[in-house]
């Protein structure tokens, strides 16, 4: 009996001790974790990326090369202060977020530092005493390939109706190369890279087997170990076309909502841009080829004003007091437009 009472008393004391000790510890831990998370979320983290990419905190380039620095800092708060320091660069400091492209013309070891609100991050820059290279690809003319600009970007383009793919004939004319220079070309279509060792590549080719937009990544590695990379855009396709059809018409003098379907031409490919516009002072809407060809895709337009005083030119016929809905389709091979109307809300 005495043993049972002793055991009960001991268990009761242990239970009370556990409750007394355990509950405050659990509560304190929960508060601690919440405060820790809140503090962690608000900590300023200063960071930036570089092109070329840093390896183990350092970037190695040749004289004359450029490094682009892009801020990736988080939790900078409201109105942060930026201070970039570019030792050895053609521009030694900046006070804006960036990105900033800095050229290094003198060999040496330097440090680039980004300071935001008193916190800093840095990277080492090693500039070797050898001249950089400029990777250059030249397309062979007279075989269907041309050079053009699209959306402010240069393109090699091959434009032909009823064809698929194209044979890209090219040579390279990269600078400061010799017999020990390495050339690596990634064609951007999932095929094996072209590799070559020597001064330059002459009269070579690559077979693209499908239409669309591709990016060539051309890297040149000099004997000194310095490397430089150039990106080239490639488009294979045809001059694009498109038409539009409407579902519903707003009632005269009673503005309403109309849905439109965009019908792309069968020759259109990825890289084609579609711009939908109604001449009722609303902004244009731009769509990609992938968006337009998604099943069930429609454009919804709200007519909120009447068309009195507006004229529309549809297929060279002028319609007074009316709106029109038009589609302009473009890619590096060209552009075309079509319209539907008159619309008289």
Image (cartoon, rainbow, N blue to C red):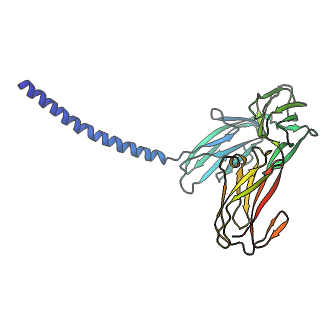
Asked where in the image residue 20 lies, by quadrant, the reply is top left
Asked where in the image residue 339 lies, by quadrant, the reply is bottom right
Q: Would you say 224 lies left or right of 8 here?
A: right
Residue 198 versus residue 158: which sits nearer the camera?
A: 158
Above or below, 166 against 242 in this view is above
Taking the image as drawn, is residue 223 in sight? no
**Image spot of residue 264 (x, y percent):** 76, 49
Q: Quadrant of the C terminus?
A: bottom right
Residue drawn at point x = 79 percent, y = 39 percent: 211
Q: Would you say 124 lies left or right of 186 here?
A: left
Residue 119 versus residue 273: which sits nearer the camera?
A: 273
Taking the image as drawn, is residue 130 in sight? yes
> Which residue is situated farthest in the bottom direction here?
309
Residue drawn at point x = 67 percent, y = 73 percent: 253
> Which residue is situated farthest in the right direction here?
142
Residue 175 versus residue 64: which sits nearer the camera?
A: 175
Residue drawn at point x = 64 percent, y = 71 percent: 254
**Image spot of residue 205 (x, y percent):** 86, 31
Q: Quadrant of the N terminus?
A: top left
Residue 210 versus residue 34: which sits nearer the camera?
A: 210
**Image spot of residue 223 (x, y percent):** 80, 27
Asked where in the image residue 216 lies, by quadrant, the reply is top right
Image label count: 0
Q: Would you say 38 lies left or right of 210 here?
A: left
Above or below, 278 against 264 in this view is below
């Amino acid at each position: 009996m005495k043993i049972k009472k002793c055991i009960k008393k001991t268990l009761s004391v242990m239970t009370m001790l556990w409750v007394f000790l355990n509950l405050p510890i659990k509560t304190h831990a929960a508060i601690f974790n919440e405060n820790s998370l809140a503090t962690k979320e608000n900590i300023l983290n200063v960071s930036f990326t570089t092109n070329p990419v840093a390896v183990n905190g350092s970037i190695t380039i040749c004289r004359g090369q450029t490094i682009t620095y892009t801020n990736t800092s988080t939790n900078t708060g409201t109105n942060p202060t930026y201070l970039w320091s570019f030792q050895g660069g053609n521009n030694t400091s900046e006070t804006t977020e960036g990105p900033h492209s800095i050229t290094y013309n003198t060999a040496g070891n330097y440090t680039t530092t980004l300071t935001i609100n008193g916190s800093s991050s840095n990277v080492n820059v090693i500039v070797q005493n050898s001249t950089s290279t400029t990777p250059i690809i030249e397309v062979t003319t007279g075989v269907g390939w041309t050079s053009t600009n699209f959306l402010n970007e240069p393109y090699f383009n091959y434009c032909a109706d009823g064809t698929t793919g194209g044979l890209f004939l090219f040579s390279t004319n990269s600078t400061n190369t010799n017999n020990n220079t390495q050339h690596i070309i990634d064609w951007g279509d999932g095929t094996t890279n072209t590799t070559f060792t020597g001064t330059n590549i002459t009269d070579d080719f690559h077979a693209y087997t499908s239409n669309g937009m591709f990016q060539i990544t051309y890297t040149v590695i000099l004997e000194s170990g310095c490397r430089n990379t150039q990106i080239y855009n490639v488009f294979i396709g045809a001059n694009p076309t498109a038409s539009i059809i409407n579902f519903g018409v707003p009632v005269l003098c009673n503005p309403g909502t109309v849905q439109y379907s965009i019908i792309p031409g069968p020759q259109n490919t990825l890289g084609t841009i579609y711009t939908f516009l109604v001449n009722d002072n609303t902004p244009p809407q731009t769509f990609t080829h992938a968006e337009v060809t998604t099943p069930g895709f429609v454009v919804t337009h709200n007519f909120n004003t009447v068309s009195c005083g507006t004229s529309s030119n549809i297929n060279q016929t002028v319609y007074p007091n009316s709106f029109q809905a038009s589609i302009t389709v473009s890619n590096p091979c060209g552009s075309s437009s079509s319209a539907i109307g008159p619309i008289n809300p």
